Amino acid sequence: MQASISEVFCSVQGEGPYVGYRQAFVRFTGCNLNCNYCDTPVEVTNVCRYEAVPGSNVFLDIENPLLPARVGEMVNSYPRLHSVSLTGGEPLLCAEFISSLITDAPLYLESNMTLPRMAKKIKDKISYVSGDVKLLPHSLLEDPELHLDRTIECFRILKATKARDCFCKIVVTKDTPVDEIEGVVGAISGYISSLILQPVTQKDMQPEPGCLLKLQKSFLNDVNTRIIPQTHKMWGCL
């Protein structure tokens, strides 16, 4: 099983409760959604950009697609990692690849949580789950109700256990429907360790601070809720 990887590099996690932890990042190409605030290219590429020396901004071009063993070698070249972030794009599109991936550090999945059948294939391989809830305009979804059902099912499959942390991250824009946030959080609160409200980075789409504080307050009785922006954007790291 091979996969198209856009880049492999070592940096720190910039989002959610594990902000600042040192990670290797494996960025998969391809995605099953089309988010209007997405800031990451997801197109399939001919080469994978590999930064052998962290922070050097010097990349080697490795021909795609790649085997799990090759990606494991690249990742394992970085010492003292907290975990290996599988990001994208949507990593669950490559569930069989992930099932064969062997790394020295535990796996940290960053997913849009809409592919429950794929989630079942890798649930025992993953130690950390950063599950995004994509509350997109209905015009961008073929079936909004099915989208929500799949999201809830993914969180049920990848729920927090003694062996796995699972938290929910919701990117909040000025147009994000509050009632939909309340509905989905109510459905998954028993599956997650915490809820992260992440104000969108694009300034023209950001919600008012008061809106975020009110939203946080409404959830605090049910789940540990924090407001954390994209910190890596603040200091310019990958």
Image (spheres, rainbow, N blue to C red):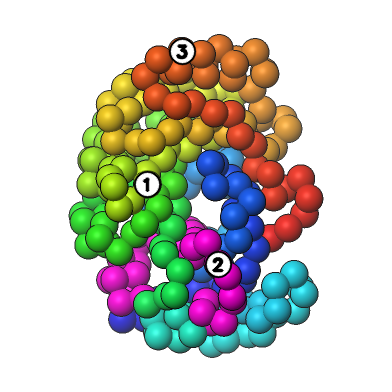
Secondary structure beneath label 3: helix
Q: Earlier in the sequence, mark 1 or mark 2?
A: 2
In this figure, which residue is indicated by the disc labeled 2?
81
Residues at circles 1 and 3 in contact by the CB criterion of under 8 Å: no
Residue 29 appears in the figure: no
Indicate left or right for 140 with 92 as reference. Answer: right
Q: Position of residue 82 (x, y in %)?
A: 52, 61
Q: Position of residue 165 (x, y in %)?
A: 37, 47
Q: Position of residue 191 (x, y in %)?
A: 29, 36
In this figure, which residue is indicated by the disc labeled 3?
218
Q: Mark 1 is on which residue type?
A: Asp
Secondary structure beneath label 2: loop
Of residues 19 and 155, the one nearer the viewer is 19
In this figure, which residue is indicated by the disc labeled 1?
165
Indicate left or right for 82 with 113 as reference. Answer: right
Indicate left or right for 90 with 209 as reference. Answer: left
Looking at the image, which residue is at 64% across and 51% down? 20
Q: Mark 2 is on which residue type?
A: Leu
Vertical relation: 198 (above or below) 220: below
* Label 1: how many Cα within 10 Å (few below 14, some 14–19, many 20+): some
Q: Which residues are magenta?
A: 74-101
Secondary structure beneath label 1: strand
Q: Position of residue 126 (x, y in %)?
A: 34, 59
Of residues 97 and 219, the one nearer the viewer is 219
Foreground tag (1 vs 3): 1
Looking at the image, which residue is at 21% across and 56% down? 120
Count of numbered circles on the image: 3
Residue 173 appears in the figure: yes
Q: Mark 3 is on which residue type?
A: Ser
